[in-house]
């Protein structure tokens, strides 16, 4: 996991492909868009804009991906994201290949991050994360999840 601020993303030490993906997505002004999927560069790069209410962590499952890197950018509200290191997901359900996700009941040696508007967190493939969790109370949030195919790091 890598965390940073959209106003100085280069300070997070992101690989060039991830930094570029973040910049391309932010140039599309996701804060002004309705919820939905927006294709940026075919299946290599797209973004999901979403708005929902945060939930208590015990009401949610963690997720992980195999093909895509998640760049989660908080636009409005505050959220906690519980996460773990590479391959630390436990008690996982069946992997859904077409949607590239797997839900898991537990994260070994779980850690937590609080995001405020303008902050982001990057999760590499097989790094479990449980986003959209309550900080102090349930609240509406808006975020964009930028999805970059892992092959972009090999180019």
Image: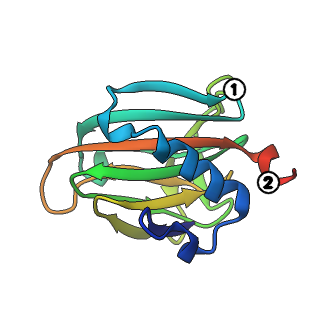
Tell me where residue 118 appears, x and y as whole percent. 34, 60
Rendering quarter of residue 112: bottom left
Q: Which of 78 and 39 is in front in this view?
A: 39
Element at label 1 = loop
Mark 1–mark 2 distance (CA, rounded to whole Å): 16 Å
Q: How crowded is mark 2: few (under 14 residues within 10 Å), some or many (20 or more)?
A: few
Against 95, residue 13 (above or below) is below
Tell me where residue 132 appears, x and y as whole percent. 33, 48
Left or right, 123 with reference to 119: right
Left or right, 22 with reference to 142: right
Q: Which mark is residue 83?
A: none
Tell me where residue 141 appears, x and y as whole percent. 24, 45
How does the figure colour the protein chain or chains? rainbow
Q: Residue 42 carries which label?
A: 1
Residue at the image position 35 percent from the left and 44 percent from the top: 143
Closer to the chain start, of discs 1 and 2, is 1
Q: Residue 153 carries which label?
A: 2
């Amino acid at each position: 996991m890598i965390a940073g601020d959209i106003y100085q993303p280069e300070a997070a030490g992101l690989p060039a492909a991830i930094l570029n993906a973040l910049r391309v997505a932010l140039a599309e002004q996701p804060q002004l868009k309705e919820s939905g999927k927006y294709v940026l560069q075919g299946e290599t790069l797209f973004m999901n804009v979403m708005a929902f209410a945060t939930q208590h962590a015990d009401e949610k499952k963690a997720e992980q991906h195999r093909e895509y890197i998640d760049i989660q950018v908080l636009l409005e509200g505050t959220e906690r994201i519980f996460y773990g290191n590479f391959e630390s997901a436990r008690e996982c359900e069946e992997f859904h290949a077409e949607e590239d996700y797997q839900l898991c009941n537990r994260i070994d040696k779980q850690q937590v991050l609080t995001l405020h508007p303008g902050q982001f967190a990057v999760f590499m493939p097989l790094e479990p994360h449980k986003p959209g969790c309550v900080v102090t109370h349930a609240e509406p949030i808006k975020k964009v999840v930028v999805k970059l195919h892992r092959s972009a790091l090999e180019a």
